[in-house]
Structure formats: C-alpha cells, structure tokens
Amino acid sequence: MTLISLTITDLLIAASLVLLVALLSWRLYLGSAKQLLIAATRSAIQLMLLGYVLHLRFESDSLPLIAALSLFMLSVAGYEVMARQKERFRGAWGYGIGAVSMFISAFSITLLTLLVIIQPDPWYKPQYAIPLLGMLLGNTMTGIAIGLDNLTRNARELRDQIEERLILGQTWSQAIGDIRKDALRSGLIPIINAMAAAGVVSLPGMMTGQILAGSPPYEAAKYQLMIMYLITAGTGFGSLAAVWLGSRHLFDARHRLRLERLKKR
C-alpha cells in the first residue's frame, strides 16, 4: 500500500472548514472565534516544525538530543496545564504540580514501554520514543488539567463546607476528600469515554494513522490497544499525583484552608 502525499492545496481545503466554524462562531457571538483561529494557526506551525525536527532526529540516534526534545515537550505541557486552569496556584506550584505529575507518570510509562514492551534497538530509538511520549504527555496533560481545575474551583465554591469539617476535627485530607474524589473522576472521564467508544463509535487516531500509512489493520489495532492502555495508566497516575499535591498545598501544616494560595487567571 502506497502512502498518498498531501499537497498544500489539500491542507488549505481542510483549513477552510476550520475558518468556516470560526466564522459561524463570530456570527453567533460565541466569543471563541479568535481562540479557534489562534489554536489552528499554532497547531499548523507547531506540527510543521515538529515534522521537520523529527525528520532530523530520526536520522540520528543521539540520546542527549532526544532527552533535550523530551524535556522541552514536558516543559510546554506543564505550561499548558497551568494555562487551562481558571484558578491556578501562585508561584512555582502553579507550573510545578502539572510538570512533576507528568514527569512521574508519562516519562516512567514511556520508559517501561520502550524497555519492556516494544524493546527497540537502541531502546531510545526516536521513531518510537518521541511519538509515544508525545501521545502520553498530550492525554495525561488533559486529564491533569481537568482534575486540577475541578479541584481548585470546587475548593473555592465549597469553602464553607470544608471549614465546617475542619472545625469538627477532621484532618485536611478528610475535609477535602469528596472534592478530591470528584476531581479525580473528572480527570479520568475523557479517557474512559475514548476507550468505551473505540472501534464502535470512533476509529482512534494512532490506528487511523497506521492504516493510512500502510500497516496491516490487525497490527494497527494491537498498537492502538497498547497505547490506549498506556494512556489510561498515565492519565490515572498523573491525575492522582496532581490532585493529591494540589489538595495538600491548599492547606498549611496546621490543617488550615489557604485559598490565598490560588489566583484567578
């Protein structure tokens, strides 16, 4: 099976549909036309640059270069987690919670996959390492951002309930326990929905890409299944770490709620 190359005209036709959605948003006063156009422009620039960089990296198995690119991807993902929250933590915590949680989850699972499951030679072969890390970071980032946003928003809205529990003698963990559970559930909803719909309602992205590139459908399905399980694990561990760190930072050593540690975007 031969891969059909896309021309600039093909991409412009697809982009015109996004422009049409932005126009409808503007006409209906939805307030999202500018954001939509900026996001579409950013994605075009970022993906073209990424394609060029990966083309160079695939020709070189330099571990320092791959590590540098991985850390750059992590730093951008950490910023995106912070930017998506309506109420974020002040100072280094605002960026650090998301970045540390993704490092713990996405990086460790990527290493496990490369060393134990796929086992390319060398183990850091960029053809496998960079796409795997990118998919894990992208999905983990979404789960962490949703979980943290839910946590901080509900902590603000349910402040009286939390402080009542503290007055009754509960610890910080008990006082915010229900809010923390809701935040974790919200972070897992996207990947749970994606798994439930895979192969029935939707054809997942990795499987679609492999089939279009000429891979046998059965092999593409196996890779997609592996990726979905890995993404679920990464999202679960990352959300758990981020929500726990965030909920702990909402209280001081004397179990007092410290909402002044949050600031609105």
Image (spheres, rainbow, N blue to C red):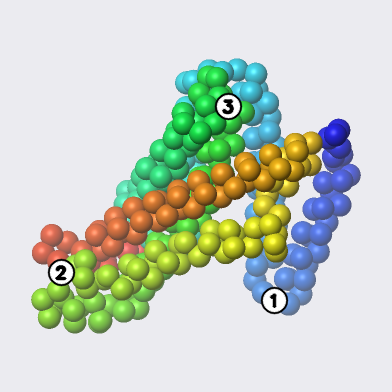
Q: Where residue 206 sits: x, y (%)?
A: 66, 45
Q: Considering only order in the chain, which callout, 2 or 1, is on the residue closer to the N terminus?
A: 1
Q: Which residue is mark 3?
A: 126
Q: Residue at x 37, y 48 (%)?
A: 101
Residue 153, given in percent of the width and then of the height, sits at 39, 71
Q: Nearer the viewer, residue 195 or 189?
A: 195
Mark 3 and mark 1 lie on one chain; the one further toward the N terminus is: 1
Is 16 left, or right, of 150 in this rendering? right
Q: Residue 87, image x and y in percent?
A: 39, 65
Question: Callout 1, which amino acid?
Answer: Tyr
Q: Secondary structure at mark 2?
A: loop
Residue 247 location (% of width, % of height)? 28, 62
Q: Quadrant of residue 262?
A: bottom left
| Distance between the alpha carbons at the discs numbered 1 and 2 | 46 Å
Is the residue marked by circle 3 packed among few (<14), some (14-19), or many (20+) residues within 10 Å? many
Q: Do we see residue 84 in this rendering?
A: yes
Q: What element does badge 3 sit on?
A: helix
- Callout 1: SS: loop
Q: At 44% across and 40% down in the image, what residue appears? A: 109
- Tell me if mark 1 has few (under 14), some (14-19) or many (20+) residues whose alpha carbon lies within 10 angstroms of its own: few
User: Split into 4 quadrants, where in the image is the C terminus?
Assistant: bottom left
Which residue was labeled with disc 2?
171
Q: Is residue 87 visible?
A: no
Q: How many marks?
A: 3
Question: What residue occupies the far front of the structure in this picture?
Answer: 218
Q: Which residue is mark 1?
A: 29
Q: Which residue is rendered at x = 58% and y = 58% of the image? A: 195
Amino acid of disc 2: Thr
Label located before the other in sequence (2 or 3): 3
Task: Give the Cα distance between marks 2 and 3.
Answer: 47 Å
Q: Residue at x 19, y 67 (%)?
A: 172
